[in-house]
Image: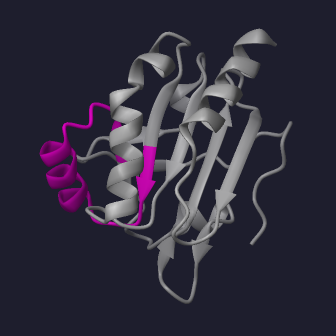
């Protein structure tokens, strides 16, 4: 798997949110966006990670960072998950063509049919400034997001 290179524009995409409204990466330009790929809705580690982001969303909002979570789950599952957990950020469905965006970002596990835990911070001009991909079962650290956002704001 090859992830997009830092300092370059990552692949653009259009994915439906939990209500079926298309969201494009290029449409989010003008402000930074963090893309958070997760393997499965409702799983313990994914829920823990997103609840931590939800509980600390002010860190992102104060820096003008848009949070967009991408999963290969269908949009209806993502909507139920967002409702249950009170997620106020975008959850985007990469269900069909299955994992197409995760593949483009080098974070699709072909053998298991889901995204792995990859995060990508794109600046307001559409350039990739930070990324991390964790092995299965290992949650991403909130402190890593905070450091990446702080470095982007300081630049």
Split into 4 quadrants, where in the image is the N terminus?
bottom right
- Which stretch did the figure color magenta? 69-91
Q: Quadrant of residue 134?
A: bottom right
Asked if the stretch drawn in magenta spans residue 134, the answer is no
Decide if residue 113 is in sight here: yes
Is residue 86 toward the left or the right of residue 63 in the image?
left
- Whole-percent x and y of residue 154? 77, 10
Q: Residue furthest bottom?
A: 111
- Whole-percent x and y of residue 56? 41, 26
Near-viewer residue (94 or 86) = 86
- Whole-percent x and y of residue 85? 19, 44
Is residue 92 toward the left or the right of residue 78 in the image?
right
- What is the tally of numbered marks visible in this picture? 0
Decide if residue 10 is in sight here: no
Residue 103 versus residue 25 in the image, above or below: below
Residue that appears at 41% across and 17% down: 58
Near-viewer residue (35 or 96) = 35
Asked if the stretch drawn in magenta spans residue 89, the answer is yes
Residue that appears at 81% across and 13% down: 155
**What colour-coding does the image apply?**
one colour
Residue that appears at 25% across and 62% down: 42
Residue that appears at 60% across and 48% down: 119
Residue 72 versus residue 121 in the image, above or below: below
Residue 104 versus residue 146 in the image, above or below: below
């Amino acid at each position: 798997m090859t992830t997009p290179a830092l300092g370059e524009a990552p692949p653009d995409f259009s994915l439906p949110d939990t209500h079926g409204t298309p969201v494009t990466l290029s449409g989010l330009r003008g402000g930074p966006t963090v893309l958070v790929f997760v393997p499965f809705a409702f799983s313990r580690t994914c829920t823990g990670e997103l609840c931590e982001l939800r509980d600390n969303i002010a860190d992102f909002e104060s820096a003008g960072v848009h949070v967009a979570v991408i999963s290969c789950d269908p949009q209806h599952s993502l909507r139920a998950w967002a409702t249950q957990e009170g997620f106020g950020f975008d959850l985007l469905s990469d269900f069909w063509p299955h994992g197409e965006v995760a593949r483009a970002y080098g974070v699709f596990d072909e053998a298991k049919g889901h995204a792995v835990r990859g995060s990508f911070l794109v600046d307001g001009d559409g350039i990739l400034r930070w990324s991390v991909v964790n092995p299965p079962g290992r949650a991403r650290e909130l402190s890593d997001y905070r450091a990446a956002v702080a470095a982007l704001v300081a630049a």
